[in-house]
Image: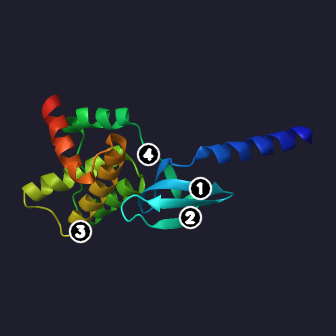
Amino acid sequence: MLFLLFVINLKLMRYRCMYDQNDYIVYQDGIARVIEVENNQVIIEDYISQEIKNINHHHIIRKICSLETIKDILERIEFIRTVYAPQKKVLEELYQEAMMKYDELEWVKVIKSVYVREKMKKAYSFERAYRIQAEHFLNSEISILLQIPEEEVNQYIINSIHENG
């Protein structure tokens, strides 16, 4: 019985340490800064809107990635495959699945796929919205990691691609 209480207490301690004040996290609506953690509730400040929100900890996907992870993805960007599907409906489902993973590599796949399809003038009307959302999430993370305005992120990405290409 004492061991069981110890395990439960250890799990609770691990939860409390999962997100600290001022951590940046990815949640369902974008990127946010943790202001306070209390029980199952997390008070956050949305990175873009600056809106203060009280959310359940289950809405938090993960902490933002490291700068090394972003640099690694940008170094490999020309080798990252695009999303392809023979039908419009399947393509949209693949974009939805990629976005629901809340992963930088998946966001790059979506951005790159839509960019290529737009250049070929073969993009469907729904694709632009996925590209914009993926760019928003990715650029927000890079902006935080580099401590630069989000408007400068695209130029940083272009420079990184030219340095590695």
Q: CA distance from mark 1 to mark 4?
A: 17 Å
Inter-mark Cα distance, 2 to 1: 11 Å
Q: Could you say whether the residue bearing mark 2 is in a helix, strand or loop?
A: strand
Amino acid type, callout 4: Ile
127 relative to 33, above or below: below
The residue at the point 59 percent across, 58 percent down is: 57
Which type of secondary structure does the marked residue at label 3 adopt?
loop
Which callout, 1 or 4, points to the residue nearer the camera? 1
Please give the residue where the numbered disc 1 appears in the rendered image: 36
| Residue 84 shows up from this direction | no
Q: CA distance from mark 2 to mark 4?
A: 17 Å
Residue furthest out toward the bottom: 125
Reading the chain from its start, which is encountered first: label 2 or label 1? 1
Q: Badge 4, how many Cα within 10 Å: few under 14, some, many 20+?
A: many
Identified by mark 3, the residue type is: Phe
Residue under label 3: 126
The amino acid type found where label 2 is placed reads Ile
Tag in front: 3 or 1: 1
Disc number for residue 64: 4
Q: Secondary structure at mark 1?
A: strand
Task: Say which of marks 2 and 1 sits in front.
Answer: 1
Determine contact: label 2, label 4, CB under 8 Å.
no
Mark 2, residue position: 55
Instruction: Find residue 7 and report its horizontal and vertical position in percent.
Output: 79, 40
Q: Secondary structure at mark 4?
A: loop
Sequence-earlier tag: 3 or 2: 2
Label 1 sits on what residue type? Glu
Sequence-first tag of 3 and 1 = 1
Q: Are marks 1 and 4 in contact (CB under 8 Å)?
A: no
x and y, in percent, of residue 72 in the image:
31, 32
The residue sitting at 19% across, 35% down in the picture is 160
